[in-house]
Structure formats: C-alpha cells, structure tokens
Image: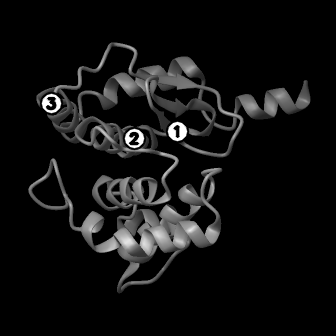
Amino acid sequence: MEEESYKKYEGCTVNECENMIQRSLRTPMVKFLMEHMDKAGCKLGDNFIKAVNCEQQMGGGYLRGNGIVVCSNHMKIQDDVNQVVIHELIHAYDECRAANLDWSNCAHHACSEIRAGHLSGDCHYKRELLRGFMKIRGHEQDCVRRRVMKSVTSNPFCSETAAKDAMEAVWDICYNDTKPFDRAP
C-alpha cells in the first residue's frame, strides 16, 4: 500500500493526463503535425493519443497500430505532456510517410529518434539546463545523440554498438530532414 500511494503522487492521474492531452491538441505545433499527418493520408482516430500508467521510466511512446501513449505517472506539468505528444507525433509522421519503416532496423529507429529529438524541442537549451547539462556550444546535437542512444539501445534488436553505428550512419541525412517543417522549429 505504501509503495502504491507513493506512485500515485509521482506524476498525475490518468484523468488529469487525459485533460492535459486535450489541451495539448490545441497547441500550434501539435495542430500542425496532426494536419500534416492528415495531408499525408494518415487519419488519427479520437483515441490515437491516450494516457496510461507505465511500468518503465519513460514519458511515453509511439506504438505502431496503437498510437501514442503518454505515461501519466511520469507527467507533472502541461509542458511535459506537450513535449511527449510532439516527440511521438514525429515518430507517427515518420511511419506515415515511409511505408517501409521497420522499428527493428536500428538505422530506421535511429533516424526517427534523431528527427524527433531535433524537431520536437526535446533538446532546447532550457530543458538541458533543467536536466543538469550546462554546455553552451553544441548542446543540441549532443543532447539529440544522447537521447537517440538511450532510445535505440532499449530496442531489443539493437546492441549499443549497433545503435551507435546506425546513428552515425544516418546522422547527416536524418538531422537535416526537417519534414513536415520548412526548417527545424
């Protein structure tokens, strides 16, 4: 019981998170990404983005065929929810526009993570400062690389070496691919 009550206050409830997701759907960046998903022929159902309690220590994820989950028990504020929704929508957009995206392929996974890290604002210097990373020059690319490695090495098909090799192999192409944006936001 004690551990359960501790977990309850770690983040927010599923209901509170669902309300934050609804607010997030009205933000310009989320609206923009959803419009481009629609233009690319990918219709998002009403339940495409949902709040759940997660066992793993993560903010959320994109699951092919199931949409986006936001881990309510790891969300504290609206900005956290917005960030997860934007990051995961970039993965959904990537899958929408690339008919052959294979998440078990380390290079495909790394490319989508590079794009999501670069385009979502995950690595904005203010976020990095809050995480305790105080580098001024080159922080954004270092952050994207760090976060790509964390995500791709969690893929059961990708060892640390395979993840690093894949990230390096696709870095330039994927980092410079800013679709559906004209340039990195």
Image quadrant where residue 25 sits: top left
39 vs 23, nearest the viewer: 39
Q: Residue 93: x, y in percent?
A: 27, 39
71 vs 114, nearest the viewer: 114
Q: Residue 31: x, y in percent?
A: 19, 32
Q: Which residue is mark 2?
A: 88
- Mark drawn on residue 35: 3
| Mark 2 secondary-structure assignment | helix
Q: Amino acid at mark 1?
A: Gly
Work out which quarter of the rendered image holds the N terminus and state it: top right
- Look at the picture and state if 181 lies above or below 4: below
Separation (CA) of disc 1 from disc 2: 8 Å
Image quadrant where residue 43 sits: top left
Give the tally of numbered discs. Answer: 3
The answer to whether the residues at label 2 and label 3 have Cβ atoms under 8 Å apart is no
| Left or right: where 142 falls relative to 155 | left
The residue most toward the right is: 1
Q: Residues within 10 Å of mark 3 (few under 14, many from 20)?
A: some
